[in-house]
Amino acid sequence: MLRRGPFRLFERLIDPVAPPGAMAGRILGTPVPGDAPPRSLPGFYWHFMKQTRALFLALFGAGMLVALMDAAIPTMIGRLVGLLTTHRPEALWGEAWPALLGMTAILLIGRPAALLLQNLITQQGINGNVTSMIRWQSHYQVVRQGLPFFQEDFAGRIATRVMQAGPALRESVVQVINAVWYILVYGTAALLLLASTDWRLAIPIAAWFPCYALLLRFLVPRMRDRSREASAQRSLLTGRIVDSYTNIQTVKLFARAREEDAFVRDGVLALTEAFQRQMRLVTFNGFALATLNAAMITGMAAIAVWLWTQGRIEVAAVATALPMAWQIANISGWVAFNVTSIFENLGVVQESMNSIAVPPTAPDPPGAKALRVPRGDIRFEQVRFAYGRELSETSRGVIQGLDLRVAPGERIGLVGHSGAGKSTLVNLLLGFFRPEAGRILVDGQDIGGVTLESLRGAIGVVTQDTALLHRSIAENIRYGRPEATLAEVEAAAARAHADAFIRDLQDWRGRTGYDAHVGERGVKLSGGQRQRIAIARVLLKDAPILVLDEATSALDSEVEAAIQEQLETLMAGKTVIAIAHRLSTLSRMDRLVVLDHGRIAEEGTHAGLLRQGGVYARLWRQQSGAFA
């Protein structure tokens, strides 16, 4: 069994999951900014390569050694043939032992050692660590984007771009380094060695080089473009498949398997067409290169044999020239394959940049400070927001010059027709969007100047559409406070009336109770069960500000009545903003704020607003009539 020592030495050169900004590899010790990678392709590559450049420089040196060793092999073959033709068998070992020993050392020790060093750097130092580092930093960047970033793309496509950027970038760099050395070292060595014997021997290689360069000049840009197109279609297909799987319940409820088949089939056909266009270039490249190499080898053989018949060169020169031409032909095929692969990977990297090299859509402002919330006083001052559109009386979800104060410990309910701006107001408070005018203050601090992490850490939220993580029940509840003990998790679940059903759960792997996993987005639980888990999570978080956005809408009446009692406990001493279309759930709020087209239409207690006979009274009569 192989010992781990030499491998671990190279495997530990880079920490693949160190925080961006502290990465740089211990081999350099230079911190790297954690900002988004540049949007230019060279800048994107350098953003990651500079963190591990010592390893890539080492690979460059090891590649040079291997290329020199390989270039020496045809020379050694010619040298050996020359020794055999100029020495008597009985005198060969005695007279030529230094040359034979040197060639043996190169073959048995030098080349294997150079290959070992190259492989240790590549396989142990670069492949796993650099790939993981790029994936980690890409995820670190993407997961901190604002909510609109994820709402405007397939989650599957974003994940695919994060996953494929690492191996594509790493592999293209390694291939470029290896290809450069083989072309430069081997090609230059061949020309010099053959020309030193007879300048005419260098003619086939000298003629081959520009033809090979023209072939690459023709193929490279086309391969790059077609590779990028194929990569884009691959990501789009992945996004479509993941979209179908994520919404599988909807697919089955509406019996739309055939429509989903067509949706995915179109993606498969588009990817197939893009891939076939790419493969046409690969096939053409193989044929053109085979023809070019055959001409070079034939020309080399003809010139070498003719020079030998003329007595201009020795047999040793022929024995050097032909293997060298054959080796160049093999290397050119390998380099051409690598060039194809390099530009396929370039296309993948360019496509991945569309999700990774994106400036933060919701960055913390420069000099942002942590929010401190000793009281929980909230003020909206002349807040205006219209999602970048022009304001109008019929705009949905906009806020028009709104002034509102929520006193510390006060519980208010936001009421209004759908599109009146209730959820928009909450999203502005949570920092998902920035006000286009005005400001929002929490305990006198403008939230536009605080870190989003501290802002959201001070607010507990229960939404209508609760999506759980595909992890255990305990991990989902502990999301509210990661350091909480299991006893505290169970206590929060009990207060949310969730403990009883949790203890009866069992997943497909046999895990039970708080260890049972809930499935993607919590699909294995009912809507009411998911909501109670979400309430337990917020109970555990115990933030000073509480937002309830249709928090009990997924619960049946009996469970809602029981949880309302716990919500009373949860709301005690907290500043509360609650949204509910079921107005009966808000009747016990300290104050109701009625929104209409982004403005406050009226506000007061439930009883007082009913006496006014305004917007709230009409909404109440509509619901009461529907219930009746």
Image (cartoon, grey):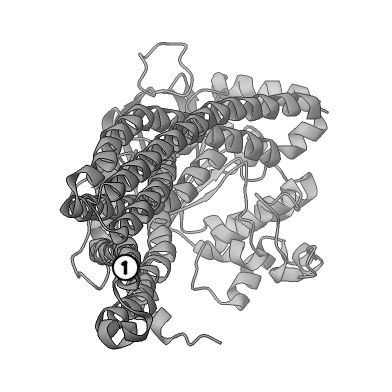
Amino acid identity at mark 1: Met
Quadrant containing the C terminus in the rendered view: top right
Name above or below for residue 529 compared with residue 153. below
Q: Position of residue 95 (x, y in %)?
A: 26, 84
Q: Quadrant of residue 30?
A: bottom left
Q: Quadrant of residue 19?
A: bottom left
How many numbered circles does the render carry? 1
Between 583 and 359, the one nearer to me in the picture: 359
Which residue is depicted at the point 23% across and 57% down? 50
Which residue is depicted at the point 55% across and 20% down? 615
Between 233 and 17, the one nearer to me in the picture: 233
Which residue is depicted at the point 30% across and 72% down? 83
Name above or below for residue 456 compared with residue 477. above
Between 330 and 6, the one nearer to me in the picture: 330
Q: Position of residue 567 (x, y in %)?
A: 61, 54
Between 256 and 310, the one nearer to me in the picture: 310
Name above or below for residue 385 compared with residue 36. above
Which residue is depicted at the point 40% across and 50% down? 326
**Regarding mark 1 in the picture, which secondary structure is present there?**
helix
Q: Position of residue 104 (x, y in %)?
A: 35, 79
From the viewer's perspective, is 129 left or right of 33?
right
Q: Position of residue 18 (x, y in %)?
A: 34, 67
Q: Is residue 61 visible?
A: yes
- Number of other residues with Cα within 10 Å of mark 1, as a class: few under 14, some 14 to 19, many 20 or more: many
Q: Is residue 456 visible?
A: no
Quadrant containing the N terminus in the rendered view: bottom right
Q: Which residue is mark 1?
A: 76
From the viewer's perspective, is 374 left or right of 235?
left
Q: Quadrant of residue 495?
A: bottom right
